[in-house]
Image (tube, helix red, strand yellow):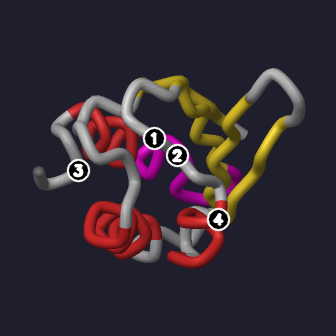
Amino acid sequence: MVNGKVKIKNPTGLHLRPAGLFCKTAMQFKCKITVLKKTRHEDVTANAKSVLSVLGACIKSGDEIEIVCEGTDEETALREMVQLVEDGLGE
């Protein structure tokens, strides 16, 4: 299991278009990919391969998320997912 933290930079957060790109990228990997977002009241987890799950996490601009990858290609997956977020999710 590997994990990394990254801050959402794009001004609109993970709305439908960037969430779709995020999930499409996650689906290219065999490993399980989970997104964790800590709030004051609770910790929210989302399956990175499910658009509805990612949208349900309500990830906004400026939020810090943790990406957790578990499986055979976990290191490559983490590197790609973090880079995607750092590049602004196509926006």
Residue at figure coordinates x 62%, y 57% from the top left:
33
Find out whether the residues at labels 2 and 1 contact each other: C-beta distance under 8 Å: yes
Residue 59 — which label? 2
**Between marks 3 and 1, how big is the CA–CA gap?**
13 Å
Label 1 sits on residue: 60
Q: Amino acid at mark 1?
A: Lys
**Between marks 2 and 3, how big is the CA–CA gap?**
13 Å
The kind of secondary structure element at disc 3 is loop
**Between marks 2 and 1, how big is the CA–CA gap?**
4 Å
Earlier sequence position, callout 3 versus callout 4: 4
Q: Which residues are magenta?
A: 70-78
Residue at figure coordinates x 69%, y 41% from the top left:
36
Numbered disc in front, either 3 or 4: 4
Query: Crowding at label 1, few (<14), some or many (≥20) Cα neighbours within 10 Å?
Result: some
Find out whether the residues at labels 2 and 3 contact each other: C-beta distance under 8 Å: no
> Which quadrant, please, contains the N terminus?
top right
Label 3 sits on residue: 89
> Is 47 located above or below residue 11 in the figure?
below
Residue 60 in magenta stretch: no
x then y, percent, for residue 26:
45, 66
